[in-house]
Image (tube, helix red, strand yellow):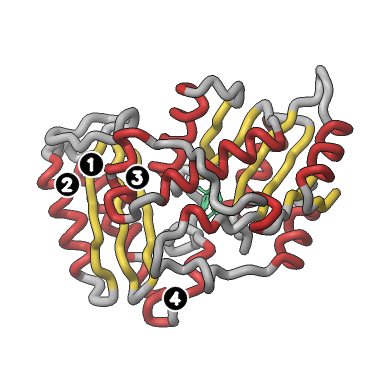
Amino acid sequence: MLTVRTREELTAATRDLRGPSRKVCLVPTMGFLHEGHLSLVDRAHDLAETVVVSIFVNPLQFGPGEDLGTYPRDEARDLALLEARGTDVVFVPTVEEMYPAGDPQVTVSPGPMERRLCGAHRPGHFRGVLTVVAKLFGLVRPDVAVFGRKDFQQSVLIRRMARDLNLGVRVETGPIVRESDGLAMSSRNAYLSGPERTQAVGLHRALSATAALFGGGERRAAALLAAVEREIANHPLLSLQYAEVVEPEGLEAVNSASPGDVVALAAFCGTTRLIDNVELS
Ligand code: AMP
């Protein structure tokens, strides 16, 4: 495994590892890796001969008062995990390497979907995400890139960016990997205290309850969301930021749910913001 820290090293490394019959797959991450990230690396190996993983905590996607300064990091552990999963190249740039001229003047606008779901509560977040992903696509020039379904709105926006801007990258999505009690794996779970960790499973329980209701024939979004709210209320350390039933193309809220629609939510567990979602089927 090659660990590279500069754009020049990255270009040289990927030049040597691509070819007409050697496709390149990129897995962008912010590090502090867990099985959710590593499942994407496994998927990348199924999709391409060369797997590139980036580890970069992107300041552009954090708002004022968010956790940029405290975001968990453990580069040595991340590199060992990636090496064990057969990663070919790991790109670990500094902020100066990614943004040598400071904050970019030209950024990627997420369009109307920016105001939906998490975007409504994190102004500028998805502009920051799309901008760094576009930069990573430009640097790595992957044939395919893999993102987790855990960050549902992000995966929809990146797929849409690749399509609308003809970036020539196929965007794939991997399923949510969960802890044994159902909590979606997240680097931010490291922030949770013991009691918070116990109650964080309420997000999954809320989504499971609403999915079961849909499976039983309930189609009214209001009733599906009432089930979410009831389950969250059973967990006093959780406070719901939003829960919505949306269609998966434009992320518009629906009144009557159909198979393929998604229930997405964000909740604070203590001071830690967690997200999760489920596809209705
Ligand atoms: P992050 O490091 O949080 O920016 O995540 C990097 C990638 O891993 C994103 O595409 C996430 O959606 C994905 N990811 C994070 N958590 C999970 C999970 N529990 N299951 C699957 N993918 C995940």
- The residue under label 4 is 192
Q: Do labels 4 and 3 touch, CB within 8 Å?
A: no
The crowding category of the residue bearing disc 3, from other C-alpha atoms within 10 Å (few below 14, some 14 to 19, many at least 20), is many
Residue at horizontal 54 percent and vertical 20 percent from the top: 166
Amino acid residing under circle 4 = Leu
What distance separates the C-alpha of mark 4 from that of mark 1?
27 Å
Report the residue that reaches farthest toward the right: 16
Residue at horizontal 18 percent and vertical 68 percent from the top: 233
User: Is 160 situated left or right of 39 in this image?
Assistant: left
Circle nearer the N terminus (1, 3): 1
**Of residues 224 and 181, which is closer to you in this image?**
224
- The residue under label 1 is 245
Q: Is residue 122 shown to the viewer in this render?
A: yes
What distance separates the C-alpha of mark 2 from that of mark 4?
28 Å
What distance separates the C-alpha of mark 4 from that of mark 3?
22 Å
Rendered location of residue 101, percent (x, y): 63, 50
Which of the labelled discs sits on residue 44, or is there none?
A: none
Residue at horizontal 29 percent and vertical 47 percent from the top: 117
Circle nearer the N terminus (3, 2): 2
**What secondary structure is found at the residue carrying circle 4?**
loop
Q: Nearer the viewer, mark 4 or mark 3?
A: 4
User: Is 229 situated left or right of 200 in this image?
Assistant: left
**Of residues 12 and 22, which is closer to you in this image?**
12
Q: Do labels 2 and 1 touch, CB within 8 Å?
A: yes
Looking at the image, residue 74 lies above or below residue 260: below
- The residue under label 2 is 224
Report the residue that reaches farthest toward the bottom: 194
Amino acid residing under circle 3 = Val
**Of residues 222 and 30, which is closer to you in this image?**
30
